[in-house]
Image (cartoon, helix red, strand yellow):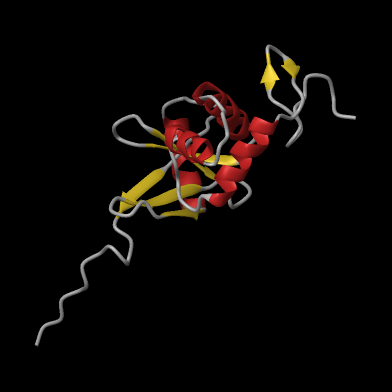
Amino acid sequence: MPGAGSSPAGHGVRRGGKTSRSTRQGAAISAALGATETFATAQELHSLLRATGDSIGLTTVYRHLQVLVDRGEVDVLRQPDGETLYRRCVSEGHHHHLVCRACGLAVEVSSPDVEAWAARVAAAEGFVDVTHTVEISGLCRACSPSPRRDP
């Protein structure tokens, strides 16, 4: 049996140090994330759920998304305008994202060079127990202009 106060995957939302039972809403949000191949806002997920007849509230969507983020089951991207995007995490372990500015394609990448750089920068500034998030944006192959060839 899990320890007191734990919230194993699929077994509820933590509220005030207590774990609630799994809910239909939580399952619906997980299913909506699983059906979405790209990153989506909480509002987009809410609209998707409402369109399928689910009467879930937007606050509930945000609450369940945060639980999934805390568990490491959902990736988060923050847009320049402050909007937060969510997607089911497709790889385990620490990773970063390459995001296409045109179509929104997101590719998960791992890089020992990025990890070493982050540790070096933090140490140089006297920081310890450091975490980091790196998002690299650009244009994917499909959205990039074709390379010009000289005649």
Q: Position of residue 129 (x, y in %)?
A: 57, 27
Q: Residue at x 48, y 47 (%)?
A: 96
Q: Nearer the viewer, residue 12 or 141?
A: 12
- Residue 94 appears in the figure: no
Q: Nearer the viewer, residue 101 or 29?
A: 29
Give the quadrant of the C terminus: bottom left
Q: Residue furthest top?
A: 16
Q: Where on the picture, by quarter, is residue 67?
A: top right
Q: Residue at x 75, y 15 (%)?
A: 18
When the figure is inspected, residue 66 is found, relative to residue 53, above or below; the finding is above
Q: Residue at x 31, y 66 (%)?
A: 142
Q: Position of residue 57 (x, y in %)?
A: 53, 24
Q: Is residue 125 left or right of residue 60?
A: left
Q: Residue furthest left?
A: 151
Q: Residue at x 42, y 42 (%)?
A: 134
When the figure is inspected, residue 100 is found, relative to residue 119, above or below; the finding is below
Q: Position of residue 1 (x, y in %)?
A: 90, 30
- Residue 45 appears in the figure: yes
Q: Residue furthest right?
A: 1
Q: Position of residue 17 (x, y in %)?
A: 72, 14
